[in-house]
Image (spheres, rainbow, N blue to C red):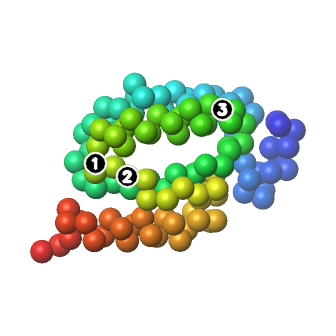
Amino acid sequence: MSPLFPIARPLGLAARMSAAQHAEINIEANELCAPAALDPVFDRLTVPTRYVLATGGNLGGDPKLMEQIRANLDPVLARHPNIRVSAKVASNHSKILRNDFRAVADAVRELAVTPAHQVA
């Protein structure tokens, strides 16, 4: 994939970094998505929170690993009634706002009518 990065950069399809830097960031992102890293963050959430879950693959990511990361959300949803999946969309994380902006807007609207977000 590294020979394609110089072509993809001007088109906005790749960041301005080397293939090694891309790989390092992907590895770090996967580590940060592990339950051991995220569970304490979720446990501190006290306000209603909505997810728009992107089910598409990511560039350079193993589809099985991505599915495992998404599955890590299930126990969190079971423990925390304030955290919900508002929608599941076919996009991946890099195209969700471009392709599924309506689902994101619906999630925001859903939160706007919750008691914790209403202004007196």
Residue 65 is tagged as: none
Q: Mark 2 Cα within 10 Å, few/some/many (few <14, many 20+)?
A: some
Q: Amino acid at mark 1?
A: Pro
Upstream in sequence: badge 2 or badge 3: 3
| Quarter assignment of residue 62 | top right
Q: On the image, numbered disc 3 is attached to which residue?
A: 64
Q: On the image, numbered disc 2 is attached to which residue?
A: 84
The percent coordinates of residue 5 (x first, y second) are 80, 43
Whole-Å distance between the Cαs marked 2 and 3? 23 Å
Q: On the image, numbered disc 1 is attached to which residue?
A: 81
Upstream in sequence: badge 1 or badge 3: 3
Q: Is residue 95 above or below residue 71?
A: below
Q: Are marks 1 and 3 in contact (CB under 8 Å)?
A: no
Whole-Å distance between the Cαs marked 1 and 3? 27 Å
Q: Secondary structure at mark 1?
A: loop
Q: Residue at x 28, y 71 (%)?
A: 113
Image position of 73 (left or right of 64)? left
Q: Amino acid at mark 2?
A: Arg
Q: Mark 3 Cα within 10 Å, few/some/many (few <14, many 20+)?
A: few
Q: Amino acid at mark 3?
A: Lys
Quadrant of the drawing holding the C terminus: bottom left
Q: Residue at x 25, y 39 (%)?
A: 44
